[in-house]
Amino acid sequence: MNKPLGQHETIIPREHLDFGLDETIPKYWFRSDAYKTRVFDAVQSGFPDGERYFITSVRAFRDRIADPALLQEVRDFMRQEGQHGLAHTRYNSMLERQGMPMGEILKEGKDEFDRWTNNYSAEFNVAHTAALEHFTATMAFAYFAKASVMEGADHRIKALFAWHAIEEMEHKSVAFDVMEKTAKVGYFKRALAMLLAMKNMIRYTYRYTDRMLAADGFTRAQRIALHIRNFLWLHGPRKGIYGSLTGKLFVYFKPGFHPTQEPTIHNYRNWLETWDRTHDPFAACDALCAAAYR
Ligand SMILES: [Fe+2]
Ligand SMILES: [Fe+2]
């Protein structure tokens, strides 16, 4: 079978979306499953500070961008990431009200992002950003290519993830283009930054999932048992949420790789057409899920 051609979508900032993230969302909103819910909660908790870091890293090169089309993309990328940060800040407030130690978790995360900004070169930070953006660009595939992955999720959180995942796919090449065309980062630094990004993603996922489960009252032994029992759900090579993406992630190490070589998710148009018609992120998410593979 021929690999579908890669695509570059238009970046459309969509602002002031309200997903109704409040106390009516069940604490364990994903299939009433504490572990799986906390994995999603933990991964998303880093988004507001992560996205501020991405913006800072790209902004460092803004004045040196000569191509007006790329400059416009940078502006739209920043507007999208700014909105994601706001939405996930509301999500983190909801977790705080559930008793999650968000002050502590967010402070640790922010300190780490600040450490990178202050101690690494601007070139390395934009390379690290491009690598992390490659992760977020695969989020749509992880969550929404197959209908089964998000089945049993609360519809409000599912709609938030769908909107975010779609926009990550739209701006997937912006940080990469700034890294290559403006910062002139070469292959070695790009690959090294991806290794660091991979290590950080795994560390962040486990550290904060574990911290949240501890706040929920699970003992250390119970948490270890949960990590083991759910290992294949996350890392299984065929069906694991992240494991099934290994190929999509490792393609980043190919010399000559560019994000637009990768196809857009097959059901993107279903989300987009419904959004354009209704401006309703819930209806757009339903269309995305209805067109997902069974
Ligand atoms: Fe984002
Ligand atoms: Fe992004």
Image (spheres, rainbow, N blue to C red):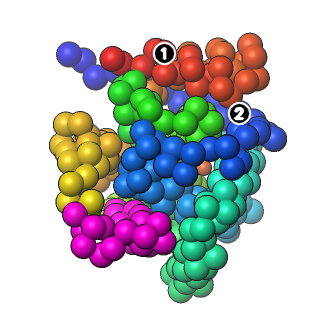
Disc 1: which residue: 290
User: Is residue 216 inside the magenta stretch?
Assistant: yes
Q: Quadrant of the N terminus?
A: top left
Q: Residue at left 60%, top 68%? A: 99
The x, y position of residue 243, in whole percent, is 25, 46
Query: What is the secondary structure assignment of the residue under circle 2?
Result: loop
Query: What is the secondary structure assignment of the residue under circle 1?
Result: helix
Label 2 CB sits under 8 Å from any ligand 1 atom: no
Q: Residue at left 67%, top 43%? A: 24
Question: Circle 2: is it few (<14), some (14-19), or many (20+) Cα within 10 Å?
Answer: some
Nearer to the camera, 20 or 2: 20
| Predominant SS along the magenta part | helix
What amino acid does circle 2 point to?
Ile
The x, y position of residue 208, in whole percent, is 44, 69
Disc 2: which residue: 12
Residue 106 in view here: no
C-alpha span from label 2 to label 1:
23 Å
Nearer to the camera, 237 or 217: 217
Q: Is residue 50 left or right of residue 16?
A: left
Question: Circle 1: is it few (<14), some (14-19), or many (20+) Cα within 10 Å?
Answer: some
Please determine whether, in this image, residue 144 is positioned above or below residue 209: above
Q: Is residue 194 left or right of residue 278?
A: left
User: Is residue 214 inside the magenta stretch?
Assistant: yes
Q: Residue at left 57%, top 45%? A: 26
What amino acid does circle 1 point to?
Ala
Q: Is residue 289 left or right of residue 174?
A: left
Please determine whether, in this image, residue 257 is positioned above or below residue 260: below
The x, y position of residue 177, in whole percent, is 54, 50
Magenta highlight range: 198-225
Identify the image quadrant of residue 167. top right
Q: Residue at left 42%, top 66%? A: 213
